[in-house]
Image (tube, rainbow, N blue to C red):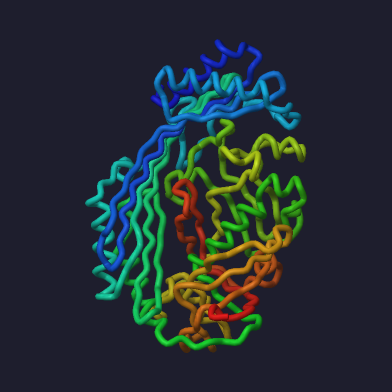
């Protein structure tokens, strides 16, 4: 039994002893270790690392629900947690939306996440070297990034993260799992123009700082002396770094089960809302040889598995915890999180499926263009190549109209050739509409794993060629 599961089992025992057998309780114990190597002005300026074990208890007692947490895992700390949570439950208003506990169920298995033992989720291919990475190993990637930038000013980070977790409840469910991630995100700057490159992976050995640094530098050098373009609708190729923002907003506002239950999501199950080329899958257990990206169970102990949200343009599912599932007569999809009853359950490992292109289609082209985007650019008559989107804000959650800015490189493309850099632009665009039927002109041949701001989520995004993107102004005004 893992250390985390031992702690969870102890809390369950305390609940039974102090609150009685009628109490329903669920306990999540998570050990999270995050290490970050930051660099600026082409030099490392900070190494930080933190490791903590947190215990979260949710208790349903006499029709009332309360939650508490602690990082004190000794006997006194755990007893205090249970006592405080019982006291809170007794003065909390009744909870008619309580959906009960997850019953005992085995974890789902896959080629990438077969488990080890009946209720253990020790990920296949889990990389111990990443979980135990040293500052020197991260610094090697930073040095390679800086050297490959060829004298340009650089900044960014290389991080490694490790999570080991366990769940237990009074209904008898008890599961464990662990996951590791490495990520790098860096920019290079030339004459006021920035270029970016970023990547996430389950193995630190899969991060090549030299490749990322060279790409960021090529973008920066190609972005000098940009021109301004007038507002209007433009054909665009969005590189994977930009597409990741679409996936993030789809996850938070579109495929969110609470938003769907409250009719605040664009999602209409069984409806062809996207172009037939679009398939979107949530894959917490990993895919295509990549080890598991997330834990094999959620914060309610529900086993996770691959979930198809959009298949060939048709919206098939949204993500649920037990509460949102009960509201619409569905089953939990394993997406409960500490705040999901308030904010809604969201997918954290979305993949927009790539569309393999003709052989040789991605070879050649300017070095600042991500490889899988090059054949899409070659097909464009007149439009924009966009590296990155940032400072995006939702104006209308129902239609998912988003406003934001481009960043880290925009270029005008005419007759399949990049003709020059463009200044950053403001856009106002419905993300589902941009990927609607007939609006996707092409999808890149590779989905690139990209880091999110949270170390336990990431997105796999290919480049996208879209018929129309609504540019509403320049970044300068």
| Image-based side of 398 in relation to 448, left or right | right
Closer to us: 419 or 119 = 419
The reply to whether residue 165 is in sight is: no
Closer to us: 293 or 47 = 47
Q: Quadrant of residue 336?
A: top right
| Image-based side of 82 in relation to 3, left or right | right
| Image-based side of 81 in relation to 190, left or right | right
Relative height, residue 200 to residue 417 (above, below) = above
> Could you say where residue 232 lies in the image, as x and y percent from the top left?
65, 83
Relative height, residue 272 to residue 83 (above, below) = below
Q: Residue at x 67, y 23 (%)?
A: 91
How many numbered callouts?
0
The reply to whether residue 472 is in sight is: yes
Closer to us: 387 or 466 = 387
Q: Quadrant of residue 267?
A: bottom right
> Could you say where residue 339 lies in the image, as x and y percent from the top left?
59, 40
Q: Residue at x 53, y 26 (%)?
A: 27
Q: Residue at x 47, y 50 (%)?
A: 454
Q: Quadrant of the C terminus?
A: bottom right
Relative height, residue 81 to residue 257 (above, below) = above
Q: Quadrant of the N terminus?
A: top left
> Could you say where residue 2 lies in the image, as x and y percent from the top left?
40, 25
Q: Residue at x 41, y 55 (%)?
A: 200
């Amino acid at each position: 039994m893992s250390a985390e599961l031992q702690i969870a089992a102890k809390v369950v025992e305390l609940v039974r002893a102090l609150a009685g057998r009628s109490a329903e309780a669920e306990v999540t114990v998570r050990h999270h270790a995050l290490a970050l190597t930051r660099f600026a002005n082409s030099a490392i300026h900070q190494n930080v690392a933190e490791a903590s074990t947190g215990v979260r208890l949710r208790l349903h007692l006499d029709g009332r629900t309360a939650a508490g947490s602690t990082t004190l895992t000794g006997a006194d700390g755990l007893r205090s947690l249970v006592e405080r949570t019982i006291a809170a439950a007794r003065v909390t208003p009744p909870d008619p939306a309580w959906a009960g506990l997850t019953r005992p169920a085995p974890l789902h298995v896959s080629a990438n996440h077969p488990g080890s033992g009946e209720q253990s989720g020790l990920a296949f291919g889990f990389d111990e070297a990443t979980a135990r990475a040293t500052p020197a190993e991260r610094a090697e990637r930073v040095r390679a990034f800086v050297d490959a930038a060829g004298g340009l000013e650089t900044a960014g980070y290389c991080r490694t993260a490790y999570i080991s977790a366990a769940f237990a409840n009074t209904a008898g469910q008890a599961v464990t799992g662990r996951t590791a991630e490495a990520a790098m995100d860096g920019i290079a700057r030339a004459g006021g123009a920035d270029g970016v490159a970023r990547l996430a992976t389950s193995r630190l050995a899969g991060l090549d700082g030299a490749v990322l640094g060279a790409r960021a530098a090529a973008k920066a050098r190609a972005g000098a002396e940009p021109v301004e373009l007038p507002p209007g609708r433009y054909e665009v190729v969005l590189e994977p770094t930009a597409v990741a923002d679409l996936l993030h907003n789809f996850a938070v506002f579109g495929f969110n089960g609470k938003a769907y239950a409250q009719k605040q999501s664009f999602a209409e199950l069984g409806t062809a809302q996207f172009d037939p080329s679009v398939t979107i899958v949530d894959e917490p257990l990993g895919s295509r040889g990549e080890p598991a990206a997330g834990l094999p169970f959620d914060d309610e102990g529900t086993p996770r598995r691959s979930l198809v949200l959009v298949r060939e343009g048709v919206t098939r599912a949204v993500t649920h915890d037990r509460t949102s599932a009960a509201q619409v007569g569905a089953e939990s999809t394993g997406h409960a999180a500490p705040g999901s009853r308030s904010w809604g359950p969201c997918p954290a490992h979305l993949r927009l499926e790539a569309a393999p292109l003709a052989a040789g289609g991605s070879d050649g082209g300017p070095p600042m263009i991500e490889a899988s985007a090059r054949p899409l650019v070659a097909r464009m008559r007149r439009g924009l190549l966009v590296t990155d989107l940032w400072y995006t804000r939702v104006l209308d959650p129902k239609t998912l109209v988003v406003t934001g800015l481009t960043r880290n490189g925009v270029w005008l493309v005419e007759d399949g050739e990049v003709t020059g850099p463009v200044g950053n632009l403001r856009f106002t665009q419905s993300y589902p509409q941009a990927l609607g039927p007939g609006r996707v002109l092409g999808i890149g041949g590779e989905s690139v794993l990209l880091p999110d701001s949270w170390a336990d989520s990431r997105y796999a995004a290919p480049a996208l060629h879209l018929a129309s993107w609504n540019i509403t102004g320049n970044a300068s005004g």
